[in-house]
């Protein structure tokens, strides 16, 4: 758990010259060069109903992308996260915002999220426990964890693996 270094920029606020700032998507896309030419870290708050392909020209220069879960049952941000991590190889901070619930932490980690904005301290405390609870998974994702199948293969004799 860390203090959030990013300030959320309001739609009508002046762009600060330095410091870590999260821009609303519309504001960022109006003038991406103004946002990216600052001396501080730049991130964007990306709604789940917007195509992540619109971010491709800027991904290498963004420090963070905050994906929005407007309601807990809307999972489009999971797809966006996997696309950013697995297809587009985004290595910056991938943040879950909005309705981030503790029972979804593991799924969010598996999708590639590495930062979470939570509303209650108890959720932040629960995250540390949940993140360590599961160490083996069956489904492959872009989070770098070896699946149960591949773990098993690694322990087989060399001639049996092929």
Image (spheres, rainbow, N blue to C red):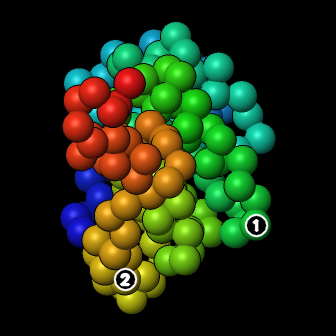
Give the residue at x 55% y 77%. Answer: 103
Q: Is residue 153 above or below residue 101?
A: above
Numbered badge on residue 142? none
Q: Which residue is mark 2?
A: 126
> Which residue sits furthest front?
159
Instruction: Please indicate, yes or no, whether residue 143 appears anywhere in the rendered image.
Output: yes
Q: Position of residue 75 (x, y in %)?
A: 71, 55
Q: Position of residue 46 (x, y in %)?
A: 60, 40
Q: Nearer the viewer, residue 152 or 34?
A: 152
Q: Is residue 24 left or right of residue 122?
A: right
Q: Which residue is mark 1?
A: 73
Q: Position of residue 148 (x, y in %)?
A: 40, 53
Q: Position of residue 152 (x, y in %)?
A: 34, 49
SS class, disc 2: helix
Q: Nearer the viewer, residue 4 or 133?
A: 133
Q: Is residue 131 above or below residue 8?
A: below
**Which quarter of the picture shows residue 72?**
bottom right
Q: Is residue 50 left or right of residue 64?
A: right
| Label total for image | 2
């Amino acid at each position: 758990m860390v203090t959030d270094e990013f300030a959320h920029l309001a739609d009508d606020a002046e762009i600060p010259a330095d410091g870590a700032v999260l821009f609303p998507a519309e504001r960022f896309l109006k003038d991406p060069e103004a946002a990216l030419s600052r001396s501080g870290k730049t991130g964007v708050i990306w709604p789940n109903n917007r195509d992540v392909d619109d971010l491709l020209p800027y991904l290498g220069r963004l420090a963070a992308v905050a994906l929005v879960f407007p309601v807990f049952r809307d999972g489009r941000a999971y797809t966006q996260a996997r696309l950013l991590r697995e297809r587009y190889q985004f290595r910056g901070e991938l943040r879950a915002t909005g309705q981030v619930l503790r029972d979804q932490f593991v799924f969010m980690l598996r999708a590639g999220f590495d930062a979470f904005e939570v509303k209650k301290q108890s959720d932040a405390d629960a995250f540390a426990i949940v993140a360590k609870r599961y160490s083996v998974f069956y489904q492959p994702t872009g989070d770098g964890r070896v699946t149960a199948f591949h773990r098993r293969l690694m322990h087989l004799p060399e001639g049996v693996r092929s």
